[in-house]
Image: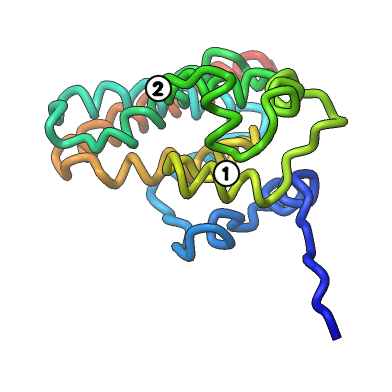
Amino acid sequence: MEHEEVKISGESLKRLSYYNNDIDYFFSGQKKICTELDEKIMRCPKKLWYDYLEIVIWLLNIGMQMDGKSTAHICNKKQLVYLRFWAEKDFSEDAIWYGIRKANGFTQDKMSAVLDIYTKRYRLIEHGRHEAEVDAEILANLYERTGFYPSLTMGNELAILTDVNRLWIDLQDETRKMLNEKLDIMVSLLLKLEDDKCI
C-alpha cells in the first residue's frame, strides 16, 4: 500500500504554537530552552507580554553589543535584527516574512529560491494573503537554509520568547546577570504603570 504524503498547514502549526507547544522541535530535534525570562513574563498580565518582550529585546541588543561582535554568531545577529524589527512593528502580520527576508539581506527572488517556491507565491505570503498558506515544508526550508526557527514566523509572544531565550543564553554570564537586574526593575515599573491605570 502506498503511503500518502501528509502536509501540515501553517495554520495548524500556529494553533500548536499559540498553546505553547514546541513547534521548533519538529524541525530541529532540539527541545525548547527555558530561562528566567519565562518566569518573568508569567508575572505580567497577558496584555503586557508584548511590552515585556520589547524591553527584553532592547536589553538583549545591549547585551550582545557589550559582549562584543566576536562572541555573536552571524545567525544570532540576523535573528536579533529580525526581533528588533518585530518589536517595532507591533505584530503586523504582513511584517513577519518581510522582516525575516530583510534580516537575511535577501531579495524576494532570493527568498523564494531559499524556500523553494515561486516568487509570485512568496510575494503573496509576504503580504499576508491567505490564499498562499505557509506549510511545514516551507518552514523546514527556512530553518535548514537560514537557521531561522519556524517559531519566528508565528507572531505570538510565547513563540518569540522561545527565540529570545536562545540568544539570551549565549550572552556571557556577567552580562546576563546585569541585564536580569535591569529587567527586574523595568518589569516592576511596567506592573506599577498598569496598576496605576486601574486605579
Q: Quadrant of residue 145?
A: top left
The image quadrant where one finds the N terminus is bottom right
Determine whether, in the image, residue 187 is placed left or right of residue 155: left
| Rendered location of residue 140, percent (x, y) | 57, 50
Q: Quadrant of residue 172?
A: top left
> Looking at the image, which residue is at 42% across and 55% down?
33
The image quadrant where one finds the C terminus is top right
Determine whether, in the image, residue 169 is placed left or right of residue 157: left
Give 75 or 17, whichever is nearer the viewer: 75
> Looking at the image, which residue is at 33% across and 36% down?
75
**Marks 2 and 1, Cα distance to the nearest angstrom?**
16 Å
| Amino acid type, label 2 | Val
| Amino acid type, label 1 | Ser
Q: Quadrant of residue 139?
A: top right
Question: What residue is shown with label 2?
Answer: 81
Give 74 or 45, whichever is nearer the viewer: 74
| Rendered location of residue 109, percent (x, y) | 57, 22
Give 101 or 39, whichever is nearer the viewer: 101
Farthest-out residue, bottom: 1
Q: Residue 181 bears which disc, if any? A: none
Give 71 or 140, whichever is nearer the viewer: 140
Determine whether, in the image, residue 152 is placed left or right of residue 155: left
Question: What residue is shown with label 1?
Answer: 151
Task: Give the class, few, some or many, for how many residues have Cα within 10 Å of label 2's Cα (few <14, many ≥20).
Answer: some
Task: Give the class, few, some or many, for how many residues have Cα within 10 Å of label 1's Cα (few <14, many ≥20).
Answer: many
Is residue 39 visible in this depiction of the protein? no
| Rendered location of residue 126, percent (x, y) | 68, 22
> Looking at the image, which residue is at 82% across and 71% down?
4
Is residue 172 visible in this depiction of the protein? yes
Disc 1 secondary structure class: helix
Of the numbered discs 2 and 1, the one sitting upstream in the chain is 2
